[in-house]
Amino acid sequence: MDVYRSLSQIDGQIPGPSAVALGYFDGVHMGHQKVLCSTAAFASIMTPCVFTFSHLAKKGDAILSPEAKFSAFREIGFQAVVSLDFQEVRGLSPDRFIHEVLIEKMGARVVCCGNNFHFGKDAAGNVDFLIQECDKAGVSVLAAGQVTFSDERISSTAIRRTISQGDMEAVRKMMGRPYSIDFEVIHGNELGRKLEFPTINQAFPAGYCVPAFGVYASVAKVDGQYLPAVSNVGVKPTVGSDRILAETHILNCQRELYGEHVQVFFLEHLRGENRFPSIAQLKEQIGHDKERAAGISRSAIRQGDWYFNIFHGGSGEGLRS
């Protein structure tokens, strides 16, 4: 999959004609997947492409890293992604965006988006305008309807709120797979090793959505294998931390992972983050957490690779289109 980060890189590079999915796609949730999968369905006759942005501050904290987002696009079947700095196109009028970017530079013959999509300078363009202008140029527009969960439209805003509440089962159903992080493994104070529960430490960068503090049943993907795990998100009130960390104890993994980007999936919030009177009591509680998390994690792993993959995961329970 080719990734283009400026309009100048696109010229003559995307084999036409193309089908283009439009959106920010933060989270690549079930609503996004409706747009993305509709676009990828044209792969046999057109080049499936995504047009998105590298960052939109007004959209709120990121749910996925850029690497995870691109991995999702690749898995769905896209051959090209145009991921721009918003500043590069923010001054384009809606009609210029359609004709100069989508049609001339990307060779679009089909455009897919959500039915509440807005674009162009001051977000003046809407789906009706997109259909009107594209029809003049012989370009088809597919506007996907809303997907709801528990009678609420699935949106990145709703998912951020639910992540912050720690309701990972609801997040999984809205995203189509468990919420995960893939930050670099960094050095910690090695207290877990001294307690006989060694952990990998991953710091949440600024601008990322943070789950409710506490302990989670989790699964870590190491060397292509899914391994049961237990994770703590927070600031370690018993021993202290100067930043928000995810500390994950991976069962049956002895390998050093410093400097690697390990994907950790959060399955269920087991308890809040507590301050313990002593290290001995902390160690005892970690043992209980590990035992409880292991059963939940192994159950998820038994469901197979589909459970963790984009648009294959999630039961679909409660979803409405």
Image (cartoon, rainbow, N blue to C red):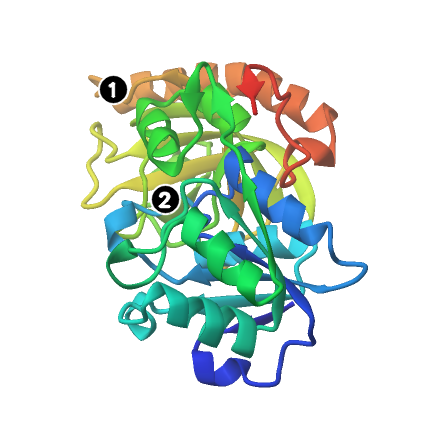
Are the residues flagged by discs 1 and 2 in contact, CB closer than 8 Å? Answer: no
Amino acid type, callout 1: Asn
Q: Residue at x 39, y 45 (%)?
A: 201
Number of numbered discs overlaid on the protein picture: 2
Residue 72 visible, this orientation: yes
- Where disc 1 sits, the SS reads loop
| Quarter assignment of residue 157 | top left
Q: Residue 159, percent across and down?
A: 39, 31
Q: How dense is the environment of label 2, judged by Cα within 10 Å: few (below 14), some, or many (20 and up)?
A: few
Q: Earlier in the sequence, mark 1 or mark 2?
A: 2
| Nearer mark to the viewer, of 1 and 2 | 1
- According to the picture, the residue beneath numbered tag 1 turns out to be 274
Residue 258 visible, this orientation: no
Q: Nearer the viewer, residue 20 or 315?
A: 20
Q: In which quadrant of the rendered image does the N terminus lie? A: bottom right
Q: Residue 194, percent across and down?
A: 39, 37
Q: Is residue 113 left or right of residue 49?
A: left
| Quarter assignment of residue 2 | bottom right
Q: In which quadrant of the rendered image does the C terminus lie? A: top right
Q: Is residue 230 left or right of residue 109?
A: left
Up/down of 218 relative to 128, above or below = above
Any mark on residue 190, and which?
A: 2
Q: Residue at x 31, y 16 (%)?
A: 281
